[in-house]
Each structure stands twice: as structure tokens, then as C-alpha cells.
């Protein structure tokens, strides 16, 4: 079992909660309020801008070969547009849970090695792709199909696969890692997953 497969196995309970969260199901089953969409797009627009900066910090920790194989950077404006937010979203500031998530990632990127940095970012990248795969074509004439199509597109899949390949190449024999290192990596990864779940839950509560 490769390292990213092991990690995903550990994250299954949280990922299942994400799949069942009412906002995510609302995307899949075409059932979201305007207020929910405005809030989510406002939060995610801020988040993705900051994520881009954090990703740039992470890239500097990778090998030259890993950097050279990185797929083209993605513009998530397309996904945001698919949720049809109103101009009111411009009046919604970043929430505390959003800032805490970004602070967690920045701390792990700055204080850890390349693997720890990638693991801080990975739950966001992979979970969106997996959500898209789970709910694509679930509902006929879904208003939000472009959102699901974006995260299942070949370009986004390439980025997700590249992230997994980097993680696996960095730790090819993860079973041989010292226990403390395994715990540190897993904690970084699962903490990000908990923040992902919190992100969706806050959006659902609007």
C-alpha cells in the first residue's frame, strides 16, 4: 500500500462525514440556498487566494524534478462562478474557522519538511476531487454540475495525481518511518481534514 492510500484509509471516517454534510449533498442534489452559496463562495475565494501562496511556499521545498512535473496551476474562479453567488458575497469577511485552517497549514509548512507541507495541503486537493467523483451525474439537470465537472476535469485530476505521486515518492517505505514521524505526518493530514469538514459544516449552517 502506498503512503497516500494509507493516509486516505485513515481519513475515511472524516471523508464520509464530508460526503454526508448537507452543503456537499446540496451541491450534488441541486439544493442550496442563496445565503449558503454566498457564504461559501466568499470563504472559499479568500481561502484559495491564501492557499495559492501556501502552495508556492511548499513548492520551494520539493525537488527540482517534482517542481518540473507540477501540472499547470488551476484557477478555481470557474468553480466559484458555478455556484451563482450574489454580489452580497463581497460583504462577507473570512470566518474564524477559515483563518484557523489557513494558520494550521502555514504553521505546518513553515515548521516541517516537504512531506509535512504537502500533507497539510493534500486534504483540500484530494477531497474536492473525490467529492466531484462521488456526486457527478447524481442529479439530472443539476444547476451546479459545472462545479462537479471542474473538480473531476482532467486538469484537476492531474493535479491530484501529482500530489499523490509526490507524497509517495517522498516516503516510499512509510512503514519503516519512526513512530513519532508517522504520528506527526498523520496528525498534520487529519487535522487538515477536520478543518475541511468544519468548512463545509459552517457553510451548511448559513
Image (tube, rainbow, N blue to C red):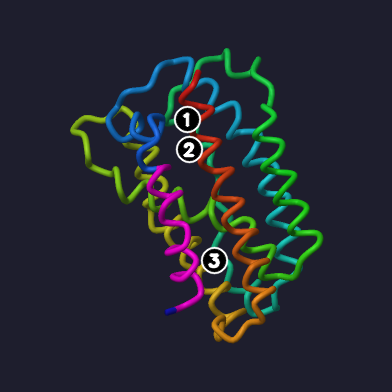
Task: Look at the image and say whether residue 24 sits in the magenta stretch.
Answer: no
Q: Which quadrant is home to the N terminus? A: bottom left
Tag 2, which secondary structure?
A: helix
Residue in the picture at 69% in, 22% down = 93
| Left-right relation of 83 to 57 | left
- With respect to residue 192, does 145 lie above or below? above
User: Overall secondary structure of the magenta stretch?
Assistant: helix
Residue sitting nearer the eye, 145 or 131: 131
Q: Which residue is mark 2?
A: 78
- The x and y percentages for residue 29 are 27, 31
Q: CA distance from mark 2 to mark 1?
A: 5 Å
- The x and y percentages for residue 83 are 43, 28
In this rendering, the label closer to the viewer, 3 or 1: 3
- Quarter-wise, where is residue 177 in the image? bottom right
| Left-right relation of 82 to 139 | right
Residue sitting nearer the eye, 184 or 151: 184
Residue sitting nearer the eye, 184 or 88: 184
- The x and y percentages for residue 187 are 63, 60
Residue in the picture at 64% in, 67% down = 185
Residue sitting nearer the eye, 146 or 134: 134
- Quarter-wise, where is residue 33 in the image? top left
- With respect to residue 117, does 135 lie above or below? above
- With respect to residue 11, does 86 lie above or below? above
Residue in the picture at 57% in, 72% down = 167
Marks 2 & 1, CB-CB < 8 Å contact: yes
Marks 2 & 3, CB-CB < 8 Å contact: no
Residue 81's disc is: 1
Q: Neighbour class for label 3 at 10 Å: few (<14), some, many (≥20)?
A: many
- The x and y percentages for residue 85 are 49, 21
Q: Which residue is mark 3?
A: 163
| Left-right relation of 63 to 165 | right
Residue 67's disc is: none
Amino acid at each position: 500500500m502506498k503512503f497516500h492510500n494509507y493516509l486516505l484509509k485513515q481519513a475515511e471516517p472524516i471523508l464520509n462525514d464530508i460526503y454526508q454534510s448537507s452543503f456537499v449533498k446540496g451541491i450534488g442534489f441541486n439544493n442550496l440556498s442563496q445565503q449558503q452559496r454566498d457564504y461559501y463562495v466568499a470563504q472559499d475565494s479568500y481561502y484559495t487566494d491564501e492557499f495559492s501562496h501556501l502552495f508556492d511556499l511548499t513548492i520551494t521545498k520539493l525537488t527540482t524534478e517534482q517542481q518540473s512535473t507540477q501540472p499547470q496551476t488551476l484557477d478555481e474562479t470557474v468553480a466559484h462562478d458555478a455556484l451563482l453567488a450574489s454580489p452580497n458575497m463581497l460583504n462577507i469577511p473570512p470566518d474564524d474557522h477559515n483563518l484557523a485552517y489557513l494558520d494550521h497549514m502555514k504553521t505546518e509548512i513553515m515548521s516541517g519538511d516537504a512531506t509535512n507541507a504537502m500533507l497539510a495541503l493534500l486534504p483540500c486537493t484530494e477531497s474536492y476531487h473525490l467529492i466531484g467523483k462521488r456526486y457527478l451525474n447524481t442529479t439530472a439537470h443539476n444547476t451546479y454540475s459545472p462545479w462537479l465537472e471542474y473538480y473531476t476535469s482532467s486538469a484537476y485530476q492531474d493535479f491530484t495525481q501529482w500530489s499523490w505521486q509526490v507524497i509517495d515518492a517522498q516516503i516510499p517505505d512509510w512503514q519503516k518511518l519512526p513512530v513519532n514521524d508517522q504520528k506527526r505526518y498523520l496528525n498534520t493530514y487529519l487535522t487538515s481534514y477536520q478543518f475541511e469538514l468544519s468548512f463545509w459544516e459552517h457553510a451548511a449552517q448559513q
